[in-house]
Image: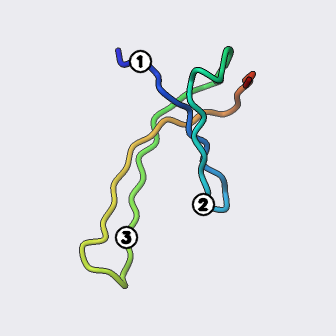
Amino acid sequence: MEKLKAIQFNFENCESEQIPIEYIPYFNFKNVYTNLSHRWSHEEENSHVLKTGLECDGFTMIAD
C-alpha cells in the first residue's frame, strides 16, 4: 500500500487545495467510495478526461 502524502479538497466552485499529511495528526473519513468521472468539451478536440478518485460522505480532521 502506498504511503499517504496529502489530502486534497475539491470545492463546489472548482477550486482545490492540498494539505500535506504531516500537518494532519488525526483524520476519520466516513463511507469512502470510488468515483469515476468523465469530462468532455465540444469546443476542444481531444478533450476527453476520465478520472477516478476517492470520495466520502463525511469526515473529521484535526490540522496543525
Q: Is residue 18 above or below residue 39?
A: above
Q: Looking at the picture, does residue 27 appear above or below residue 32?
A: above
Q: Describe the element under mark 2 as helix, strand or loop.
A: loop
What x and y, as percent, mark residue 43? 37, 85
> Measured from the top left, where is residue 41 in percent x and y?
38, 76
Q: Residue 36 at what x, y percent from top left?
A: 41, 46
Whichever of labels 1 and 3 marks the residue nearer the N terminus, that label is: 1
Q: Nearer the viewer, mark 3 or mark 2?
A: 2
48 relative to 5, above or below:
below
Residue shown at the point (46%, 22%) measured from the top left: 4
Classed neighbour count for the residue bearing mark 1: other residues with Cα under 10 Å, few (<14), some (14–19), many (≥20): few
Report, in whole angstroms, how far the alpha carbon at label 1 lies from the one at label 3.
32 Å
Contact check, label 3 and label 2, Cβ < 8 Å: no
Percent x, y of residue 47:
31, 71
Q: Amino acid at mark 2?
A: Cys
Q: Residues within 10 Å of mark 3 (few under 14, many from 20)?
A: few
- Identified at 75% across, 21% down, the residue is 62
Image quadrant containing the N terminus: top left
Say left or right for 46 vs 21.
Answer: left
Q: Nearer the viewer, mark 2 or mark 1?
A: 1
Q: CA distance from mark 2 to mark 1?
A: 27 Å
At a point 45% along the width and 40% down the height, the residue shown is 53
Residue that extends furthest to the left in the rendered view of this protein: 46
The disc placed on residue 14 is 2
Quadrant in the picture for residue 31: top right
State the residue position of label 1. 3
Work out whether mark 3 precedes mark 2 in sequence or the reverse, and give the earlier one. Answer: 2
Which amino acid, by three-letter code, is at mark 1? Lys
The residue indicated by pointer 3 is 40
